[in-house]
Image: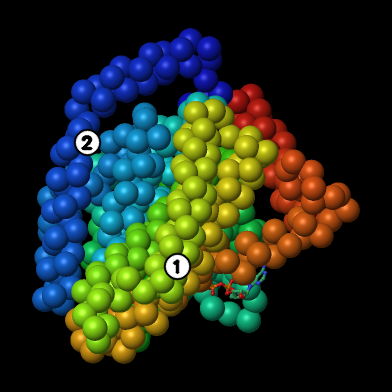
Amino acid sequence: MKAIEATQEQRAERRAEDATARSEDSASSSGAADFSAELDVAAQALEQALEKSDFDIFFDAFRRTSLPWIGIEHRHEPGTAFRRTAEVVQRLGSISPALALAVENHFYPIAAIATLPTSEDDVLDERRTKLVDSVRRNRWLVANSNSRVHGDRIAQTGTVVKPVGGRYRIAGRAAYMSLATASDLIVFVTFFETGEPAIFFCPSKDNPRLEIGPLLFPDAMQDSDTRRITYHDLELTEDNLLASARDGSDMLGILHFEMIWHQSLLAALSLGTAARAIEEGRLFLRTVKQGDGTPLARLDGMVVDMGRQVLRYRAACGALELAAKAVTDLCAQPLTPHALLDAFEIACAAKYAASGCAEDIVGVVRRIIGARTFAGGHPMERLSREVLFAPLGGDVNAYIERRAGERVLGESSFLSTTLPPSRSRSKVLANIQTLARARKATLKKKDAAS
Ligand SMILES: Cc1cc2nc3c(=O)[nH]c(=O)nc-3n(C[C@H](O)[C@H](O)[C@H](O)COP(=O)(O)OP(=O)(O)OC[C@H]3O[C@@H](n4cnc5c(N)ncnc54)[C@H](O)[C@@H]3O)c2cc1C
């Protein structure tokens, strides 16, 4: 097996290759005008798909654009990778939050794997490059599963992986897989019996040992195509493995890095929903008039109401800007526990602000528009039904609140420039540091063995 620690020359060689790839990427990457035109095509296709209740219309058009692989295309310019994926999710989130969530669930693992800083781990670097190159070359859509199930404990997982004669056998169930039927590949997290996590990938279609089951939410969010899945002793090889704690991979680092992308893109999705609600309020208030013929938009109370929504929206946009910067900065250096936790908290704050703002703004605008929201065909009807899920996905808002509460109720004054560390933050940090030490020891042992 190849030595995990690269020599200095190998690292220099890799930096030179990266620089060449970067210049090739900027030469071949689609320009801003192409990107906007493609985004218009995808948005129009989504409107048509909803009108005709036929999602093939959207996915056919989406796959013909370069949008699904934009995070991979711009992997050497993580700022552009983040901004463009966020813009796609935001635009789709202004039309169908559920479908945008399915697309976001394709974007975040793949963009995170593509931009993961792996300069310190050659094996992971090789595996992830191979994976993202195949995804882009084959124009695959990618689903993901974190193996969560609905049990009698929070954050319960339902799958297990066992090494069997040089292969890996995965069994069990997971509650959530969005984009379930349109995807070509699944990237999933599972756990060894001893509890260490691993990330595998395999085809999601026509795989008899991977059963894609019924919709998890039969009466809600159907357009996210979120389904239960069952692994019937699915057998995979080393070629299907992205990273494993047993190989010495920095699993907590990778999983946190993915979640930072996820939370930040979910914020963008919610902002799309909020912006659409404000636009629908604007259209209604300018078109519908009082008895004397003056538009409702002239009523002072309406002006103030709408002003409040716009200010709330702008504040959440500010939070997303900070998250965009945190993601971009994180991609530029080897992951450290402190940098990861800081970026995670910024991303969670953005997701929390944006999802709360979307729920509230949709509610206010629905009350302004009134019952005609539900009279058939009004965009606010779909937004009203689906925005309820904004705080429930990703790292759920209830967890984010608990962590923030623990931080503020510690011993240090809240009037310090940064929030004092919480018990849970110190615990997580200590865990990450212990794991990082264990990982270094594993790498050293492997290095010595090879
Ligand atoms: C529409 C939708 C699509 C999804 N698609 C995918 C997908 O494609 N792939 C994927 O892997 N996952 C997906 N998920 C799952 C998502 O990533 C989260 O795992 C999931 O939303 C967690 O919610 P839960 O209710 O299952 O959490 P649970 O852990 O079961 O928690 C349930 C509730 O308990 C309370 N709670 C739990 N822990 C705490 C705590 N520490 N402090 C305070 N309260 C707490 C909260 O109120 C929480 O809502 C999706 C979720 C949704 C809603």
Q: Earlier in the sequence, mark 1 or mark 2?
A: 2
Say if 188 sits above or below 230 in the image: above
- Residue 275 visible within the image: yes
Q: Which residue is mark 2?
A: 32
Given residues 398 and 213, the one toward you in this image is: 398
In which image quadrant can residue 388 be found? bottom left
Element carrying mark 2? helix
Given residues 438 and 330, the one toward you in this image is: 330
Given residues 17 and 422, the one toward you in this image is: 422
> Residue, x 35% and y 61% (percent of image)?
275
> Residue, x 62% and y 69% (percent of image)?
398
> Residue, x 38% and y 13% (percent of image)?
16
Few, some or many C-alpha atoms within 10 Å of disc 2 (few <14, some 14-19, many ≥20)?
few
Under mark 1, the amino acid is Val
Q: Which residue is mark 1?
A: 304
Q: Relative to 224, is 331 on the left or the right? A: right
Residue reaching furthest to the top = 9
Say if 206 sits above or below 39 in the image: below
